[in-house]
Image: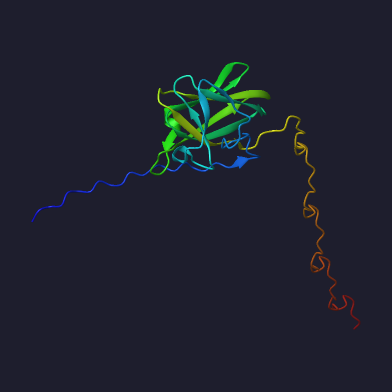
């Protein structure tokens, strides 16, 4: 009998460990449904081709190298943020502040979703100072690429701009000691036989006798 060919095991996509998010979703026009809040450069435009739409009715098309979009963000310092975008094609994400790049996405942060065609970019980055930051999403290929359904949340607790510290317990604590048995105890002694005893002497014969 012929041995049937061995079937290779199915390839599974690792599931990222969920991380709790705090606060509101921070991006405006996250799904590119309206023509606002994104600054577009170098042949970028909104696309309503449903083949390239992940959510809603439109997506953003980047038309080759140097095409990019940008959004200004007011972020608070002292915490971690998580950016997620669905991509079709090779797109780089950057976070800038005052012209300096604070974070840039890497290839390892993009994972395929199901059977495609979109992949999911997940990028965590730290913010150390309050102020206006820029999110840039730029094409890194000559063919058109598409972006849809982006989100930005804070991960974990981020302190407010003015924070009142929580009261700390006093270093000096007063405790009420438990009562201890008295070191001096009074006991009632058992009665002991008197050391002095009284005995009745037997009469002795008189030394003087009368004859």
Residue 129 seen anywhere in this rendered image of the structure: no
Please name whichever residue, 80 or 72, is drawn nearer the observer in this view of the structure: 72
- Residue 57, placed above or below residue 140: below
Q: Quadrant of the N terminus?
A: bottom left
Residue drawn at the location 81% of the way across and 65% of the way down? 195
Residue drawn at the location 60% of the way across and 23% of the way down? 134
Query: Left or right: 101 with respect to 176?
Result: left
Q: Residue furthest front?
A: 48
Please name whichever residue, 80 or 121, is drawn nearer the observer in this view of the structure: 121
Q: Position of residue 53 (x, y in %)?
A: 48, 39
Question: Colour scheme of this structure image?
Answer: rainbow
Q: Position of residue 190 (x, y in %)?
A: 79, 67
Q: Residue furthest top?
A: 99
Please name whichever residue, 136 or 191, is drawn nearer the observer in this view of the structure: 136
Q: Quadrant of the C terminus?
A: bottom right
Q: Residue furthest left?
A: 1
Query: Left or right: 150 with respect to 78?
Result: left
Residue drawn at the location 80% of the way across and 57% of the way down? 185
Q: Position of residue 149 (x, y in %)?
A: 53, 38
- Residue 129, placed above or below residue 59: above
- Residue 100, placed above or below residue 50: above
Residue 133 sits in quarter: top right
- Badge count: 0
Please name whichever residue, 19 or 112, is drawn nearer the observer in this view of the structure: 112
Q: Position of residue 140 (x, y in %)?
A: 44, 23
Residue 142 sits in quarter: top left
Q: Residue furthest right?
A: 210
Residue 81 seen anywhere in this rendered image of the structure: yes
């Amino acid at each position: 009998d012929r041995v049937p060919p061995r079937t290779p095991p199915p390839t599974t996509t690792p599931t990222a460990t969920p991380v709790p998010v705090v606060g509101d979703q921070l991006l405006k026009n996250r799904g590119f449904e309206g023509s606002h809040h994104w600054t577009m450069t170098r042949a970028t435009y909104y696309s309503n081709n449903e083949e390239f739409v992940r959510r809603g009715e439109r997506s953003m098309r980047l038309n080759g190298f140097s095409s990019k979009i940008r959004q200004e963000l007011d972020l608070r310092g002292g915490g971690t943020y998580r950016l997620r975008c669905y991509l079709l094609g090779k797109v780089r994400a950057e976070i800038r502040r005052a012209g300096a790049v604070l974070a840039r996405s890497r290839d390892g942060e993009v994972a395929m979703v199901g059977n495609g065609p979109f992949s999911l970019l997940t990028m965590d980055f730290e913010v150390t100072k309050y102020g206006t930051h820029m999110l840039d999403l730029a094409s890194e290929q000559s063919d058109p690429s598409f972006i849809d359904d982006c989100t930005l949340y804070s991960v974990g607790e981020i302190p407010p701009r003015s924070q009142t510290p929580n009261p700390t317990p006093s270093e000096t604590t007063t405790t009420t000691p438990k009562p201890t048995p008295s070191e001096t105890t009074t006991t009632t002694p058992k009665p002991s036989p008197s050391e002095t005893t009284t005995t009745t002497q037997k009469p002795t014969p008189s030394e003087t006798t009368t004859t």
